[in-house]
Image (cartoon, rainbow, N blue to C red):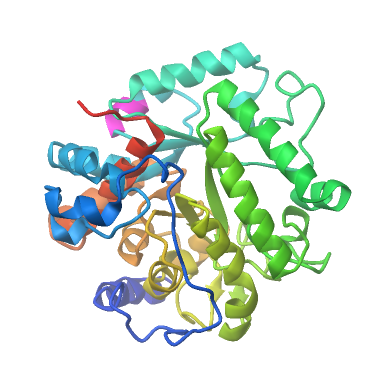
Amino acid sequence: MKKRFAGAVTAVCLALSLVGCGGDTPGAQNTSLPPQTPQSAGESSAPDAQSALPESPVPEAFQDGGIFSAYYDEAYEKLTAMTTEEKVGQLFWARCPETQALQEIADHHLGGLVLFKRDFADLTAEEVRERLASYQGAAEIPLLLAVDEEGGEVARISAWPALRPEGRFEAQGDLYADGGLEGLLADTEEKDALLSSLGLNVNLAPVADIARDPEDFMYGRSLRQDAAVTSAAVRAMTTRMLSDGIQPVLKHFPGYGDNADTHTSIAVDKRPYEQFQSEDLLPFQAGIAAGAPCVLVSHNIVNCMDDTLPASLSPAVHNILRTELGHTGVITTDELDMGAIKEFTDGENPCVQALLAGNDMLMVTDYQGGIEAVLAAVEAGTVSKETLDHAVFRILAWKYSMGLLSEG
């Protein structure tokens, strides 16, 4: 597998010439997806993107009229003042360090932290607030502080009675079955309030995958409904989360389907592209249209899109997300230390390939090794300055749109 991975890195570099220019990507003539109209959470108060372009000092190459376009000037000014080390650090959504977290945040210029159940063990709400505030205090550029609080089997916070005495939030599917969209949104609002009160600003949710068979790995975490119902729910949850001040992350693009668990091994999706067009892509498009700032890409090898690379390492998959679904926000990998990626790369560090594939943020436990690998690739020219700058530019613009960064 190592030989295959090494060849794949070279293939990614060659494939970059196709990304974003309508290359030979499945579905290039797609008419099944409805027209895409991305919108920002702050659209009503933001200046018109097109009218702002002529006066903007931001180079044309960065001007995509995207959901963060009202913040491009500030983001570009911030970008130009950063060192290469600071830029590379922003790419990393690190698993929260168990020890010396403040030093790690400062030394590595981390863009964000993902907190797991262990990070809330035996803490009161006040202790969590103090700890997260200390993390933000250690960061020169404020952090994206994220958690997987889907409800049901994936509940990092509500699993602790000290943080939610009522117990775990229910799973999406159970909530919808019991209370429909109204129940789902009431739960979303309560969840958002809890996360905000603790100092978190991102929830790695909603789950936009369609899974109808109880035997499917993703069934328990999905809405368990068809594409139309799932799309409406994802749109509504995305809108509610943004209005509540919690940033949603749509997952797991391009749709998990009936695939096996990539936490443990490689999963190969053999479904036809037409099924993605008519089903799996639609909830993601609905979330993007509602202003979702970030999409998380799975590790499944999706044969109809790229039969060689996991989605998270595939330029072809990212090209579909950018050009067909019109996503102009941040793209993040799923956790790169999961079994599927370790098996595919034979243990080699995947961060450079993930960046070259089109991800802006790299979610990884071994962030030290990843940072070293990306810095070396930038020094060697394997990762161009333009690739690095575009990714960091989107991350900074997202942070400005959230109010984490302010002008001056």
Q: Where is residue 28 in the image (x, y as percent from the top left)?
A: 42, 84
Q: Where is residue 108 in the image (x, y as percent from the top left)?
A: 30, 34
Q: Is residue 85 above or below residue 255?
A: above
Q: Quadrant of residue 133?
A: top left
Q: Which of 240 and 192 is in front in this view?
A: 240
Tell me the residue at 67%/30% (across/down): 157
Q: What stretch is highlighted in magenta?
A: 104-108
Predominant SS of the magenta segment: helix
Does residue 384 show up magenta in the picture? no
Q: In this view, does 28 lie above or below 346?
A: below
Q: Quadrant of the N terminus?
A: bottom left
Q: Quadrant of residue 274?
A: bottom right
Tell me the residue at 36%/86% (across/down): 24
Q: In this view, does 245 lie above or below 61?
A: above
Q: Nearer the viewer, residue 261 or 69?
A: 69
Q: Is residue 306 above or below residue 47?
A: below
Q: Position of residue 109 (x, y in %)?
A: 29, 33
Q: Quadrant of the C terminus?
A: top left
Tell me the residue at 68%/55% (across/down): 233
**Any part of residue 243 in sight:** yes
Q: In this view, does 369 lie to the left or right of 80?
A: right
Give the mark count: 0
Q: In this view, does 252 lie to the left or right of 171?
A: left
